[in-house]
Image (cartoon, rainbow, N blue to C red):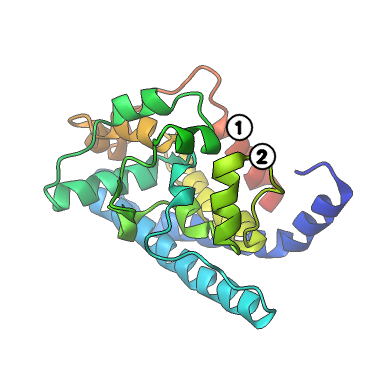
Amino acid sequence: MPNDPQSQAYFQSLVPQARILFRQGYDEARATVRPGDLASVVTLVRSLHRAIDIMGREHVGKAAAAGNMVECAAGCAFCCHQNITVSAPEAVTIVQFLRAQARAAPDFAAHAAAIGGLDFVGRYAKGLPCAFLTDQRCGIYDDRPEPCRSYLSLSRAQCERYVAVATDGGLTILRDPHTLHPFLVAGADWALVQAGFQMVSMELTALLAQATRPGVCERWVAQEAAFTTAPNDDYLARLEHVAKAMA
């Protein structure tokens, strides 16, 4: 929960929508995912992504009607230098995408080590974009994670200025999708926790370094503790807190 009164008021105004999204994700996960069935996880995640894209288009349309144009476009990849956090279902889905395409996976462990301790600006300065970015385009676009789908910039010039100098007024993005869409994913993750699945969340390439190891996805969907988490990982506690707040 934000601390300043203006942000608190904004967040409170979105709570009813957040509750609906959390419940939607929860119910869909409970109805879709079956232990031992990797395809059911992919089905869930892709359904959540479709819902996020539909909501995103609605947000973009409302912004345009108010005179605010989203300037994200193919070939613009400033945001692809951000640190993206994902949970197990999205990581498993990306691994299944790579398997279906018979594509060699990047060296995720090396990439995670290279970007360790760097922020958005630091990664851009060192030329360390997402491991899936090739020729300014996303190599897993159809299965890109929720944070990537929900990051909608209103100023390409601001994005470029921010990563170049990091001293201007910051970035201007659509707040509603960036704030609301994670509740859909959180609801699904909480449902899977309740159903007995291990739930972890970490930086994209760090999690994929584990998920691409032989047998890890299969063990996870069989409800084994297949992922190693940091001692200070608090994702389960945060999920439980959100679940109580959304009740």
The residue that appears at 55% across and 43% down in the rendered structure is: 163
The percent position of residue 127, horizontal first and vertical second, equals 39, 36
Q: Is residue 97 visible?
A: yes
Where is the N terminus found, in terms of image quarters? top right
> Callout 1: helix, strand or loop?
helix
Question: From where the camera sits, is residue 37 visible?
Answer: no
Q: Which residue is mark 1?
A: 237
Most foreground residue, 108 or 201: 108
Rendered location of residue 215, percent (x, y)? 19, 31
Q: Is residue 228 left or right of residue 102?
A: right
At x 20%, y 47%, the residue is: 98
**Residue at 15% of width from left, 40% of height from top?**
104
Residue at 58% in and 79% down: 61
The type of residue carrying mark 2 is: His
Helix, strand or loop at label 2? It is helix
Q: In the rendered image, which residue does mark 2 sit on? A: 241
Near-viewer residue (165 or 64)? 165
Binning the other alpha carbons within 10 Å of mark 1 as few (below 14), some (14 to 19) or many (20 upward) gives: few
Amino acid type for the residue under numbered disc 1: Ala
